[in-house]
Amino acid sequence: MDIPFQSTLFVSVAGGLGGGLNGLLTDNRFWWPSGVTVAAGKRLVRPGLLVNAAIGSAAAKVLHLLGGSDLLAAPLPGLAAAAITGWLAARCLSSAVDNRLLRAALSKACCAPAAHPDATEALIRASPYAAFEAACELTPPSSWATTRPGARPPNASAAR
């Protein structure tokens, strides 16, 4: 292997490790991307470890090819820079997905009736995906939900 190819390979691997580290530190501890249905006809793709690693590897490789580091002069700082670049690039992707999940969770929670304070406290402390799942459990079943204001379940009229 020639030196430029070898250094690009090392940078790509270091960036992939940084992206994989982001996947482990966030709520993306699964290998493949997974889809989440956030609304009728709307799906959100959550990146898994492999997508995080691929994004990190690509970002580190672009940085290296643009002249970001010279591995022959300083190999350890160059690889550290590649790993940090990979981690930050994958973090940007994970942050955008988490932002959309939190918006979907807020939308679901707004449609729900008043919840117990323990449930709201659990929503505050949960990860974005767990908050989305908890908000989905708060919403009433769609069988009686209507678009009219003041919609009640079918047996709620007997309680009045």
Image (spheres, rainbow, N blue to C red):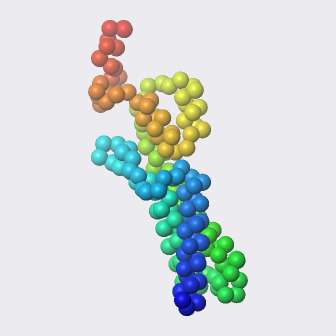
Q: Is residue 56 above or below residue 75?
A: above
Question: In front: 99, or 77?
Answer: 77
Work out which quarter of the rendered image holds the N terminus and state it: bottom right
Q: Residue 142 is drawn in which quadrant?
A: top left
Q: In this view, does 135 lie to the left or right of 122?
A: left
Q: Is residue 24 above or below residue 113?
A: below
Rendered location of residue 78, percent (x, y): 66, 78
Q: Which residue is drawn at 35% across and 22% down?
A: 150
Q: In this view, does 113 lie to the left or right of 13?
A: left
Question: In front: 151, or 64?
Answer: 64
Q: Residue 38 is drawn in which quadrant?
A: top left
Q: Which residue is drawn at 54% across and 50% down?
A: 27
Rendered location of residue 62, percent (x, y): 52, 78
Which residue sits furthest front? Answer: 1
Whether residue 85 is visible, yes or no, is: no
Q: Which residue is drawn at 34% across and 28% down?
A: 141
Count numbered badges in the picture. Answer: 0
Q: In this view, does 17 lie above or below 128?
A: below
Q: Which residue is drawn at 51% across and 53% down?
A: 28
Rendered location of residue 148, percent (x, y): 30, 27
Whether residue 76 is visible, yes or no, is: yes
Rendered location of residue 83, percent (x, y): 62, 70
Q: In this view, does 94 lie above or below 157?
A: below
Q: Is residue 56 left or right of residue 146?
A: right
Work out which quarter of the rendered image holds the C terminus and state it: top left
